[in-house]
Image (cartoon, rainbow, N blue to C red):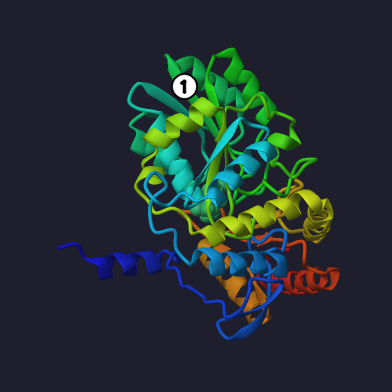
């Protein structure tokens, strides 16, 4: 028999045991976590739309009209006109011919990569890509070639060595645990040079980066160059779901091949209504992302000025590097005791020795919120000998 208790002991000894804290209120800047009033500084609710009245009204009105569940998978009885409308609008937003909505971003990555590639393919994958991408690659049966994080020399070297016929380069647009932006223009150039398809996971960039909020692909103006644009509806969009945007033929193919699309219940209509309203607000209210990026720049800059090890770039994901898992957990607990909620990120989510606090900013944080968190972070950082 497998000894779960012993395995858990060993996880604990390594400082990698995970507790779960429970929120008792909406994930706004000020919320309740574990019964305690907290400043939330680690949510993916980037634009602060999770508790927006207009999104809530859209959900409530749709529940009144359509009920609470879709009652079927997308290819049977679970597709509503709202799904079609969202897919059409997302495709316009992403500058592509078509789009397909999945029940989560994880399902979108998993089903798309596994549906598209097989044993005859080689997939070139950034070392820090999201777990759902890696899982999709493994499930596909394709040869998985990992290249060094954002290292185009390593990517080209590996393309030369392994590329034979059908290939895919896949990268996060903004890396979820590091907050850096992938060199998409260079990736696209290499892909063209060697006739390889490209896929970008824009979970963290959509609604946040780019002149139209379209994500990292919009940021670099590469709408017509990237073959597969993946996104989630659970971060800036404030709801649930994931999607793939690309050519009509790709989307039609995925409808037939992506098992996580075919064999899973469709998102309920009210989830779709929330995403439609969020998309409208993302397009109508660019000041939200502008304010988000300004606040992120300020907070990151102050951490750096005060001597913390924080990589420089301009996204709302701000990792404060700690190193040892135990120390990162201690830092997180001490901040929690001071009323600031920022979980520690440890292996296997990040490589060994690179445990960190992962701050993420929301457009709805005030300057006072961030200044308060900064002061507390500095005091604890000194106590722990990090600065
Ligand atoms: N890709 C990336 C880069 C992510 O960070 C996440 C979520 N953390 C996902 C995909 C999965 O999206 P979802 O949460 O909608 O399943």
Give whichever of 314, 55 is nearer the camera.
Answer: 55
Quarter of the image for residue 287 reads bottom right
Seen in the picture, residue 117 relative to 159 is either above or below; the reply is: below
The residue at which mark 1 appears reads as 167
Task: Tell me what residue is drawn at x 77 percent, y 60 percent.
Answer: 303
**Mark 1 CB lies closer than 8 A to ligand 1:** no
Q: Residue furthest bottom?
A: 35
Give whichever of 351, 168 is nearer the camera.
Answer: 168
Seen in the picture, residue 322 relative to 183 is either above or below; the reply is: below
Quarter of the image for residue 189 reads top right
With 190 as the anchor, is 314 left or right in this view?
right
Give the quadrant of the N terminus: bottom left
Mark 1 burial class by Cα count in 10 Å: few <14, some 14-19, many 20+: many
Give how far across and how far down residue 36 sits, in percent: 62, 85
Give how far across and how far down residue 42 sits, in percent: 64, 64
**In the rendered image, is residue 301 in sight?**
yes
């Amino acid at each position: 028999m497998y000894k779960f208790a012993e395995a858990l002991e060993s996880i604990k000894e390594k400082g990698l045991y995970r507790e779960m804290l429970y929120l008792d209120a909406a994930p706004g800047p000020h919320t309740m976590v574990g019964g305690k009033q907290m400043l939330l500084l680690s949510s993916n609710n980037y634009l602060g739309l999770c508790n927006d009245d207009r999104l809530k009204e859209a959900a409530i009105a749709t529940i009144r009209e359509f009920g609470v569940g879709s009652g079927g998978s997308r290819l049977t009885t679970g597709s509503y006109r709202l799904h079609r409308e969202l897919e059409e609008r997302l495709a316009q937003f992403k500058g592509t011919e078509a789009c397909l909505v999945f029940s989560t971003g994880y399902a979108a990555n998993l089903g798309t990569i596994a549906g598209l590639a097989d044993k005859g393919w080689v997939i070139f994958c950034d070392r820090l890509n999201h777990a759902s991408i890696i899982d999709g690659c493994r499930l596909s049966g394709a040869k998985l070639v990992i290249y060094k994080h954002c290292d185009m020399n390593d990517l080209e070297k590996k393309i030369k060595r392994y590329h034979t016929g059908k290939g895919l380069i896949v990268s996060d647009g903004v890396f979820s645990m590091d907050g850096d932006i992938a060199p998409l223009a260079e990736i696209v150039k290499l892909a063209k040079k060697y006739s390889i398809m490209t896929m970008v996971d824009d979970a963290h960039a959509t609604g946040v980066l780019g002149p139209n909020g379209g994500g990292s692909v919009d940021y670099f103006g590469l709408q017509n160059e990237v073959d597969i644009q993946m996104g989630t509806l659970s971060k800036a969009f404030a709801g649930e779901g994931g999607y793939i945007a690309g050519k009509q033929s790709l989307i039609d193919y995925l409808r037939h091949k992506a098992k996580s699309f075919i064999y899973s219940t469709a998102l309920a209509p009210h989830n779709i209504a929330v995403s439609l309203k969020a998309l409208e607000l993302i397009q109508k209210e660019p000041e939200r992302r502008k304010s988000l990026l300004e606040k992120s720049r300020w907070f990151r800059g102050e951490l750096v000025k005060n001597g913390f090890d924080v990589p420089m770039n301009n996204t709302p994901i701000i990792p404060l590097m700690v190193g040892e898992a135990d120390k990162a957990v201690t830092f997180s607990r001490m901040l929690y005791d001071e009323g600031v909620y920022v979980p520690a990120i440890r292996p296997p989510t990040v490589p060994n020795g690179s445990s960190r606090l992962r701050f993420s900013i929301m457009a709805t944080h005030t300057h006072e919120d961030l200044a308060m968190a900064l002061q507390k972070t500095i005091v604890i950082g000194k106590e722990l000998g990090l600065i």
